[in-house]
Amino acid sequence: MAPVFEPRPTGLDPTLAFPVKFCLFNIAWTFLAGEITGNVSQVDRVWTFLPVIYSAYWGLYLPLYGNGDNQWIKDQGISPRAALMVLLQVLWSCRLSYNTARRGLFSLKDEDYRWAIFRAKIPSWLFSVFNFGFIALTQNILLFLMALPAHHALFQHDLPLGTPDYVLAFLAVTVLATQFTADNQQHAFQTFKHNRPTQDARLVTNGDVQNDPKPQGQVGSKAWPGARQVWTEEDAQRGFVTKGLWAWSRHPNFLCEQTFWYLQALFPILATTTLSEATDPDNITALWPLVPPLALSALFIASTMFTESISRGKYPGYEAYQSRVGMFSPTDTLWKGLLLRARGELEKINQIVYGNAHGKTE
């Protein structure tokens, strides 16, 4: 039977030694690169695959090549649960990398627009402190923590895959597909918004100035299924997407992102503990794999609040969008709708948020 993972009071568990050193290396180079280049989006460019590297080290590398203090892992072979978790993370990485690439965020010249806004608000020395303390240190530690449930599964080799694993895997794939759809809807909207033929556009034909006859609206068949919305000039003037999944959540992609990592945490939890046992106050330590996704949620809430403070100043209708649609949960959207109806403000807010269609989907 594989050893039970128990954090050592002194020294570092052999299975954690390399990942911790790798994390420290990532903290150092992302901070220094940000300071030298003036571009602090270094962590953003490695976010899409760092958790997979950590998880694959535990789920695949050690079972195949472990030696010394980790020889027992090679002797026991690959843990099916850890391997399944790594596979799902690879799918997660492919989706996120694709979306990051088409947005141009892998470019070494690109920087998250929010950092420029925040940089302008504080002294340069304080931004350097922020770059180290939050951007480089906190985010790299979080990326390391996100993979820890796979490390926990490494010690569950003797526990075969069961119904909870298959259910969680199905839910994870569903969440990734939903997130992919949300990404595509946002991308289709931004493509239309920035490339649409405006009503003021002109064509010169045989020396005559004419209105541009090209139709406005549908992003054609090149858009992914689920993202083939009919966009209008009204949507573009509003400035932000409110159709499809974005009619029910202001950040459906972030909701799915958090959900995926909660599902990852549940793999090792439900493998050894029933849900009722895990929620027993006397057995609360069984829930420690939930710490990483909880930390991720805290990051998303804080960063989303900052992003939305920018959006409110940029788009006149964004405050109405906030009053109508939940930040993450579609349930909040339903409650907001009922509250606005009770106040007699629903039609007015719907007009601002959804436009003349007044519908949440097209």
Image (cartoon, grey):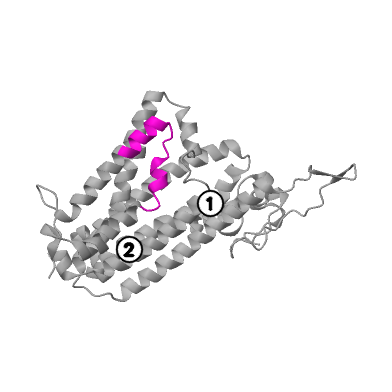
**Vertical order, 177 against 321 (above or below):** below
Q: Which residue in the protein does label 1 denote? A: 102
| Magenta segment boundaries in residue numbering | 29-49
Q: Are marks 1 and 2 in contact (CB under 8 Å)?
A: no
- Which residue shows up at 48% across the image and 64% down it? 177
Front tag of 1 and 2 = 1
Res 274 visible: no
Left or right of 103? Residue 296 is: left
Front one among 151 and 255: 151
The total number of labels drawn is 2
Separation (CA) of disc 1 from disc 2: 24 Å
Q: What amino acid type should be assigned to the residue bearing mark 2?
A: Val
Q: Quadrant of residue 224?
A: bottom right
Q: Quadrant of residue 68?
A: bottom left
Q: Residue at x 29, y 76 (%)?
A: 162
**Residue 273 position in % (x across, y down):** 23, 68
Above or below for 178 versus 305: below
Q: Nearer the viewer, residue 49 or 122?
A: 49
> Could you tell me residue 45's position as x and y percent?
42, 46
Indicate which disc, 1 or 2, sits on the residue closer to the N terminus: 2
Q: Main secondary structure of the magenta part?
A: helix
Check if residue 44 falls in the magenta segment.
Answer: yes
> SS of the residue at dot 2?
helix
Residue 178 placement (x, y as % from top left): 50, 63
Q: Amino acid at mark 1?
A: Arg
Residue 86 is marked as 2
